Image (cartoon, grey):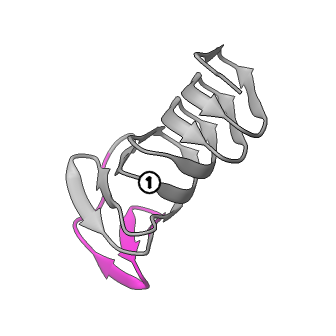
Amino acid sequence: MKIKTGGSSVTINGQIFTGGTISVTGDRIVIDGVECGDSLIGPISVVVNGNAESVETTSGNIEVTGSAGRIKTMSGDVHCADVSGDVGTMSGDVICQKIAGNAKTMSGDIKGVGR
């Protein structure tokens, strides 16, 4: 998983992190190139508390409380206010207020999308 926050905090499995780029490699959290926090256990849940330039993950639900440039996950639901680019998930629902780009899911619903 890789999140370019633009300065927003990110909650991962209940823990709050702040940095320019937050990523999860294996079961470890890396913030701006520095490993921190405990090992992640179980399904990953990500909440960006504000805006994000981009959010990419292979699995887990994603919520962005503000706007995002683009969001992509292989397996999980996506909840967001406005997205200036594309939103995609292979298996999950896309629920956003407005998407300027394309919205795509292979196995799920796309709801509340305005253009």
Is 107 magenta? The answer is no
Can you say whether 96 is above or below 43 in the image?
above
- In which quadrant will I find the C terminus? top right
Can you say whether 110 is above or below 81 in the image?
above
Point out the residue furthest to the bottom here. Answer: 33
- Residue 47: x and y in percent read 36, 45
**Of 63 and 107, which appears nearest the observer?**
63
Q: Is residue 48 left or right of residue 73?
A: left
- Residue 112: x and y in percent read 58, 16
Q: Is residue 81 left or right of residue 28?
A: right
Residue at position x 61%, y 30% in the image? 98
Q: Quadrant of residue 43?
A: top left
Is 23 magenta? The answer is yes
Task: Name the secondary structure under disc 1.
Answer: loop
Q: Bounds of the magenta span?
A: 22-41
Can you say whether 64 is above or below 103 in the image?
below
- Residue 76: x and y in percent read 54, 32
Q: Is residue 28 left or right of residue 78?
A: left
Q: Quadrant of residue 30?
A: bottom left
**Of 75 and 114, which appears nearest the observer?**
114
Residue at position x 31%, y 52% in the image? 12
**Amino acid type of the residue tagged 1 in the rendering:** Asn
Q: Is residue 54 left or right of residue 107?
A: left
**Mark 1 nearby-residue class (10 Å; few <14, some 14–19, many ≥20):** many
Residue at position x 41%, y 82% in the image? 32
Residue at position x 30%, y 49% in the image? 41
- Residue 35: x and y in percent read 34, 80
Q: Which residue is mark 1?
A: 51
